[in-house]
Image (spheres, rainbow, N blue to C red):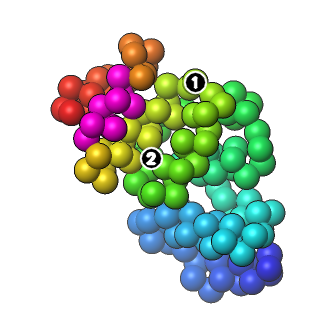
Amino acid sequence: MKKIVSIFLICCSISCIAQQQTILDLCIWHITLNCNEDALNVLDNNSEINYWKTYLQHMSVTKLSIQLDYTFPFRHETAEILEKLIANNDQWLLKYQLGLIEWHHGNIIEAKSRFLQCANLPADPNFYAARASL
């Protein structure tokens, strides 16, 4: 399976704007085939990808250096991963990112709830601007 992915990546030479989303599509495809190890092999690093790695490797979020970056997750699949991670971790960033997904999908009440759960822990002004917009 790993060879197929490598050939695919080389042939496509993923250079589109949504490169990380294409890679995430490959990851999700591998997971549906129950090939979690192969799913891990295609992932690179950014906060959304790190959530998937944490979930697939059954790690604690605190072991992973999650950070606020310019990744704006929107996938329903990522929301499911974040909900599972939040169940075992109280990191505000997980709730914030899940709130962004809920907002994107028009679930304003749930988005507000997620933002309020972050309290005043975030130091990033973008969080407060987004929360005020809700």
Q: Which type of secondary structure does the marked residue at label 2 adopt?
A: loop
Q: Pointer 1: residues within 10 angstroms few (<14), some, or many (20+)?
A: some
- Per the image, the residue denoted by label 2 is 71
Residue displayed at 49% across by 25% down? 92
95 sits to left or right of 34: left
- Could you give the CA–CA distance between mark 2 and mark 1, rounded to whole angstroms? 20 Å
7 sits to left or right of 66: right
Labelled disc at residue 58: none
* Residue 127 point in image, percent of width and height: 34, 28
Residue displayed at 52% across by 58% down? 77
Indicate yes or no whether the magenta region holds residue 26: no
Let me know if residue 66 appears in the view: no
Q: Which residue type carries mark 1?
A: Asp
* Between 53 and 134, the one nearer to me in the picture: 134
The outermost residue toward the top is 120
Q: Is residue 31 above or below residue 2?
A: above
Q: Which type of secondary structure does the marked residue at label 1 adopt?
A: loop
What span is in magenta?
A: 108-116
Callout count: 2
Q: Is residue 56 above or below residue 96?
A: below
Q: Is residue 82 above or below residue 16?
A: above
CB contact under 8 Å: marks 2 and 1:
no
Which mark sits nearer the N-terminus, 2 or 1? 2
- Per the image, the residue denoted by label 1 is 90
Residue displayed at 55% across by 74% down? 14
Q: Pick the quarter of the image with the C terminus.
A: top left
Let me know if residue 67 appears in the view: yes
